Amino acid sequence: MFFAKFSDRLIDLSHFPREDYQKLFDWSRKGLLECPVCGKPVAIRLSISAAPEFEHSDHSAAAGCLNAYTPQKSDPTNRVAEPSGAFRIPKNRSISDSADQPSAIWKNPSFPGIIAPFTEKSDPLITLFDDITLNQAQAEAVTSNASSTLVLAGAGSGKTRVLTSRAAFLIQERAAAPSSIMLITFTVKAAKEMKERMASLYGLSVQQVNAMVTGTFHGIFYRILTHHDRSRWDSKNLLKEWQREQYVKQAGRDLKLDETDFPYDQALQQIGLWKNTRLSPGEVKPADASEEKNAYLYKKYEEFKEANGQFDFDDMLLQCLHLLENDEAIRTSYQNRFEHILIDEFQDINQVQYEIIQILSAHHQSVFAVGDDDQSIYAFRGSNPAFLLRFTKDFPDAKVIHLASNYRSSHEIVATANKMIERNRERHQKKMDATFANGIKPMFFYPYDEEEEATLIVNDLKDKIRSGRKPHEFAILYRTHTGGRAIFERLSESSIPYSVDQETGSFYERKMVRTPLAYLRLAVNPDDGQAMKDLIFALFLKSHVLQDIKALSILNDCTLLEALLHVQDIKPFQQKKIQDILPYFSKIKAMSPLDALNLIEKKMGLADAIKKRGNEGNKMDKGSDDLQDLKVAAKKFSTVEELIEHADHMTALSSNLKKNGRSQANGVRLMTIHRSKGLEFPYVYVLGAVDGSIPHDFSLESARNGDFTAFEEERRLLYVAMTRAQFELYLSSPQTRRGRKSAPSRFFQAIQ
């Protein structure tokens, strides 16, 4: 059924503005739509798999109403419009009277192109010691006689089983002393799980398992440092995060950097990247003005740290490398001791880690590295798949074994992911083979924007849960935390349990979201002190001016907003700006939130604040992007008060979740793609698969300039997301992103 009535006005879906389907959905949830024939409440059905249409809210048959209804042309001269939310519908007029076509159209879902038929391969299992069963490639890796071995373990190929079996094999079959084995993982959790598996499944005693040197790179090499100089490397000397920030901010004062403006968190990330690539402060060659500032902060940061006898996490690796390089006796001792070095997630290794491994393995040349260059997605931490690609050059006698059987995902998912990732140039040529097929191809669907994307997914979740699936079987993945805003909000309004990364802060607490909201808050409440503090930031006033404003408010018996006019000792251009913008506050209170935000940006100084203080030079995290995301969220609200109330509610909810946590076991999982690495879920939705997001704008720009490094990592990122799914995969490509028309990810071209 494609017709409904709203307040005596006819709605014809075929001519209704495509961008307002979400508004129809919200109206139907409030019971504001009715059948034009029987008068029953109707709802619009928004589904990822079928075109939208109206249906009776009680799910009663609509065929009779559909056959009985013939839309009547209304009098085109009577077009008195009444406001209704974000747009206006002429009274007593059918939308179908208009000759105008919608600004966008509903786009049906699509599926990958030709997928080769599934052929079950003969891959007999081999039983080793203690009834450990492995396939042929896994067994070949576990029992390898080569001095060094590189195991290319694709997604879902059983790499953890191979690593733990290899350690047990060395002890039980090769009589290796447990203390001569170093097993390196990338997380403490992974190390713990591997030790538990070896003790429970492979016949090793607890004493044997504990005798192995097992842990993360940082954990193992920090233990080496403390063993040789406990006082210097005492944990009390480890810099806490707030101390690291304090040091760079102290250095920033030399450059007169504004603490509320300069991105010190990104400066610390840059410092870590330089350290992990063995660039000392004197060796850094800044590429631009931003890096020049960061290089100075790096120099002073190291000086402060050394002067106070302190160290950070990166020093645990870098200083261990220096120790091994500079002390021959210590170096020789460890080279003789560690006869076997086993490394997990080898594709994520950085330069310092790689050089330590080269030193430690120099005597026995026995490195067993497990990784997948197609899953290298941590370049921002200094990780580089080049070390995996050059492994056979640095270890010329190494044997390369490919684990090609994917036990996790269906043939349809594996074949689709293969077709996409094979377009990367810098990779080992390989192809994964699934071990089962279910006939369900990955689905590409095309919501109008981020809000409708969230609605479609929640509706689909409800349908699937009603059919018997469990919430914890689903994962929703997105590029960055801000990309999960809409789905977080929609799930919080539903009865579906969910869990979200507890490190995620509220979207509405981000600086360039709080700032435009401050204008709106002061329009509603001119005495909002916190909002005034955020407004001062946008007006380029010093922070101490807030106290002056509070005092002037009392002296002049006026609101904080009015007190701005009485502020002295500020520059003439600032006084003029205050005089210019103050009259607008009374206007924006009565405007729709979206119109108000546009006015704030263009007429009230927000554009200047974003340009100068919005971190616009950052490749990944721009203030202007936050503003566009806020505008998308604002579209669904009719009044400024509604948006403020919503922002406060979501901020409180996010804070509560972060403080108290939420059941991780029973809910739909929300997380970034990076966080999902190493995990698997029966059903996966991937959000925002459009150019500008995946691949990100900065990688596209680099590719245009001839550097495909970042672009290929973006393709690997999507590959990781796709291969988290076991049975069903849904990829979303909104037709608009951040209020602008968008195109499906160009990575889809290889598979559609």
Image (cartoon, rainbow, N blue to C red):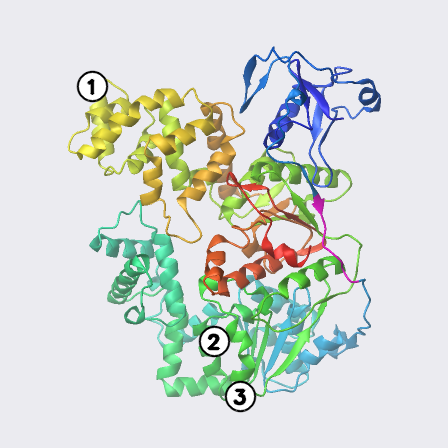
Q: Is residue 117 above or below residue 503?
A: below
Q: Say if the magenta span includes residue 110.
A: yes
Q: Which mark is residue 354?
A: 2
Task: Give x and y (percent) for residue 33.
Answer: 67, 20
Q: Amino acid at mark 3?
A: His
Asked if marks 2 and 3 touch (Cβ < 8 Å), the reply is: no
Please rate how many residues cluster around mark 3, counting C-alpha atoms within 10 Å: few if below 14, some from 14 to 19, many from 20. some
Determine the CA span between mark 1 and mark 3: 81 Å
Does residue 348 sit above or below 168 in this rendering? above
For residue 153, side relative to residue 115 (left or right): left
Mark 1 surroundings: few (<14), some (14-19) or many (≥20) residues within 10 A:
few
Question: How far apart, in angstroms, are the residues tagged by discs 1 and 2?
Answer: 67 Å
The residue range painted magenta reads 109-116
Instruction: Identify residue for label 3.
Output: 364
**Which sits in the foreground, 409 or 471?**
409
Counting from the top left corner in percent of width and height, residue 66 is at: 80, 22
Precedes in sequence: disc 1 or disc 3: 3
Point out the tag, 2 or 3, that comes first from the N-terminus.
Answer: 2
Residue 341's spot in the image, x, y percent? Answer: 55, 79
Question: What secondary structure predominates along the stretch shown in magenta?
Answer: loop
Q: Which residue is mark 1?
A: 556
Secondary structure category for the residue under label 3: loop
Report the amino acid beneath label 1: Asn
